[in-house]
Image (tube, grey):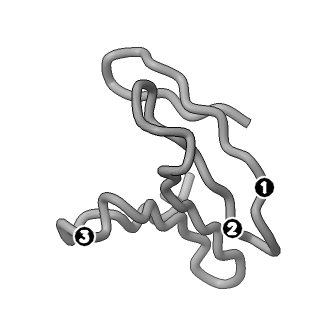
Amino acid sequence: MDAATPDGALYALRHWDADNFIYRYKGEADRTARGVKFTLGDKPQVLVENLALEGNGVFLRADH
């Protein structure tokens, strides 16, 4: 699974465990990874670890 940024860069998500995935920024050391957690249920959401530090890392599913 790949995630795109506004500038069009792609970051591959790699499974870590359960509902947790990791990705690495281009140009960072291989040992530096960021986390992404998917939560299902009544209110599905995605938490992007490095954005959560700024208070805007939770994405909720929009109803169609």
The disc, 1 or 2, on the residue closer to the chain's N-terminal end is 1
Residue 25 - label: none
Instruction: Say which residue appears at 53% left-offset and 64% top-offset.
Output: 46
Residue type highlighted by circle 1: His
Secondary structure beneath label 2: strand
Q: Is residue 35 left or right of residue 7?
A: right
Query: Distance of mark 3 from mark 2, alpha carbons?
Result: 17 Å
Label 1 close to label 2 by CB (< 8 Å)? yes
Residue type highlighted by circle 3: Leu
The quadrant where residue 18 appears = bottom right
The quadrant where residue 36 appears = bottom right
Q: Quadrant of the N terminus?
A: top right
Q: Which residue is mark 2?
A: 20
Q: Which residue is mark 1?
A: 15
Secondary structure beneath label 3: loop
Residue type highlighted by circle 2: Asn
Place of residue 41 in the rendered image (x, y in percent of width and height, measured from the top left): 71, 82
Q: Which residue is mark 3?
A: 53
Query: Distance of mark 3 from mark 1, alpha carbons?
Result: 22 Å
The quadrant where residue 42 appears = bottom right
